[in-house]
Image (cartoon, helix red, strand yellow):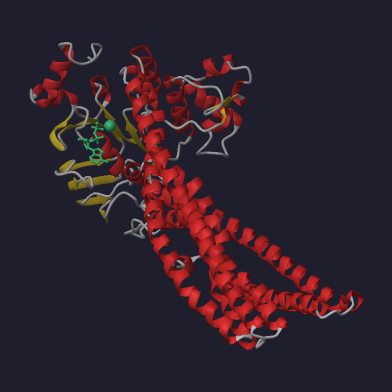
Amino acid sequence: MIDKSLFQLKGFKGIMTFLTIMAILQGVMIIFQAKYLAITVTNLFNGEKLSLQLLPILLFVTFYLAKQIIILWREKQMHTYASHTGSMIRQKFTNKLFILGPTITEKEGTGHLVTMALEGVSQLETYLKLFLPKVMNMVIIPIMIFVYTLTLDVRSSIILLLVLPTLLIFMVILGIAAKKKADTQYESHQLLSNHFVDSLRGLETLRLLGLSKRYDRNIQKVSERYRKSTMGTLRFAFLSTFALDFFSSLSVAIVALFLGLGLIGEHMFLLPALTVLILAPEYFVPIREFGTDYHATLDGKNAFQAISDVINLPEKKQTNSTKLLCWNSESKIDVENLTFQHQDAHQPTLNNLSFSWKGYGKIGIIGASGSGKSTLINILGGFSEPNSSRIRINDIALNDFSETSWQEQLLYIPQHPYIFHNTVANNISFYTPDASKADIEKASERAGLSDVIATLPNGYEEQIGESGRILSGGQEQRIALARAFLDDKRKILLFDEPTAHLDIETEWELKSNMLPLLENRLVFFATHRLHWMMEMDQIIVLDHGEIVEIGTHEELVASKGHYHNLIQAQMHGTGERHEQ
Ligand SMILES: Nc1ncnc2c1ncn2[C@@H]1O[C@H](COP(=O)(O)OP(=O)(O)O)[C@@H](O)[C@H]1O
Ligand SMILES: [Mg+2]
C-alpha cells in the first residue's frame, strides 16, 4: 500500500510516527464526541431538562472542535513536509540530470524530463499530502471504533466487522483496475509531452520541409488519445466512489436495522444503541476517504517511481584520483581502440578508433552526416562512456573522459549554443562570472559582437534568450565564442559543427574571428565543411564510424583516398559550392 521506496525519503519515518499519533488522537476525539452526543440525546429523550445538559453539550462541542483542530494542524504539517520533500526531490533530480549530461535527454526525451520535474514532483507532493494521512487513518481509526463498540454492543460490532472485508475486497479489485488505468494515463501523458516539446523544437525544420500540416494531425491524434484515457480514468474514479458510498451506506443501514430490532425487543438500552449508530458511519469514513483519494493520488505514486528510477541511475565512476595537469605544449593524449555502440543500435557507432596528439594543435574531424562526429565529440566531452578503449593522458590511464580534471579544461561549442534568458553581458560571462566589464567588451569585440550590441537599445544590459530579444544563429554563435574568449584558462576546445546552420557570408566572417581562438589550445573540430580543414594540423576522416584516413590536408590530398574523393564530390556541385 505504501511504496517501500518512500522510506528512503528524508524524515519519512518521523512523519509516519506523527501521523500515527494524530490518527489515534482523532479516533479518541471521534469516540468521545459520539459518546457525549448520545448522552445528551438520551437524557433529553428521557425527559430531562435542557438546562441540565450543558456539561455533555459542552464536552461534545469541545471534542468536536479538538478533532477539527487536529485535522487542520495535520494538514498544515503535511503541506510543509510535502512541499519540502518536493523541492528536495526536484533538486536531486535536476542535479542528477546535470551529472548524467546529454545522454539522459537523448534517452528519455526532453518533454518527458520536463514533465517529471514539474508535474511529476507536484503529483508526488499531492500523494504525500493526501494519501499518507488517509492510510494511517484507515489503519487505526476503524480498529479503535470497533474495540469501543465491542464494549457497548457485541452484535453491532460483529456486523461492522463482517461488512469490512467485503468493502476491502471490493476496494482492492477497484484499486488494481485503477492502477492499470493510471499507468496507461501516465504513459500517454509522457508521449504527449515528448511529442509536443520535440515538435516545438523542430517546428522550424518541419515548416521548412512543408511537414507542419502533417504534424498538426499527428499532435491532434496524440492529444485525442490523451483526452480519451483521461476520461476513462475519471469515469472509473466516479464509478468506484459511487460503489464505495453505496456499500458503506448499506452497512450503516444494516447496523441501524439490528439496533432498531434490539430496541423493540427491549434487550438493549437507548444510550449504547445511539452511540453505536453515531459511530457506525465514522467507522466507514476513513475507508471511504482512502478509496476516493487512492485514485486521485495514483499518478503521484507512478511519478515518484519514474523520478526515483532516474535518481537511482548509476553515475559514472571517477576512475582516477590523480589530478590531470592543465593542458600545455608538453601534454599528450593517446586513444586506442575506442569503440562505442548506442544502446539499441545493431552495430557500433564508432569502431576501433585510434589516434594520438602531443601539445597544442587543431584536430579536424570530418565525415559525412551520420559518420559519428558528434558521438566522438560527446565521448571526448565525457558525456558518453565508450564500450571499450584504452585512453591515456600524459601516460595516465583513464576509463573515459568524464574525469573532472579533464572536463574542467573543456570549452564545448555546439551547433546551437544555449542562450540563457538574461542580459547580453551575463550571457557572455556565464561561465566566468568574475569577468570585468572591460574583459566582456574585449571578448565581444573579438567575437565580432560589438557592432550588434551597439545597435541594441540597452546595449550590454539588453535581455536576450527566451522571451527576450531573439538573436540570429550567427549572433548566438558569436555569444558562444565570446564566452570562449573570456575563458583563457580552458585550453581544450570541442566544436561540434559550430557553423553548420550559418550562411556562407556569416561563416566566413566568423571564421576569421574564430581562428585566433584556436591558437595555443588543443582543439577538436567536427564539421562536414571542408574549408576548415586547411587550418587543421591533423585531420581524422570518419566514415561509418571508422577512421578511414588520418593526416594533414596535404598528405591526404596527395594520397588520393577518401578525403580526396570528398573534396572532388564537393567541388563538383554535390556539396556546398564555396568549399576550397
Ligand atoms: N541515440 C542514438 N541511438 C542510436 N543511434 C544513434 C543515436 N544517436 C546517433 N545515432 C547514430 O549514430 C550514428 C552517428 O551519429 P552522429 O555521431 O550524430 O553523426 P554525425 O555527427 O557525424 O552526423 C548515426 O548513424 C546515427 O544514426
Ligand atoms: Mg553531428
In this view, 252 is above or below 566: below
* Residue 86 in the image, given as x and y percentages of width and height: 55, 55
Identify which residue, 34 or 328, lies in the foreground. Answer: 34
Identify which residue, 336 or 576, lies in the foreground. Answer: 576
Would residue 88 appear left or right of 25 to someone viewing this image? left
Q: Residue furthest right?
A: 51
- Report the number of numbered marks: 0
* Residue 429 in the image, given as x and y percentages of width and height: 53, 34
Q: In the rendered view of the protein, which quadrant contains the C terminus?
A: top left
The quarter of the rendering in which ligand 2 is drawn is: top left
Q: Residue at x 73, y 79 (%)?
A: 35
User: Which corner quadrant of the image does residue 455 belong to?
Assistant: top right
Q: In the rendered view of the protein, which quadrant contains the N terminus?
A: bottom left
* Residue 344 in the image, given as x and y percentages of width and height: 21, 46
Identify which residue, 212 or 423, lies in the foreground. Answer: 212
In this view, 359 is above or below 253: above
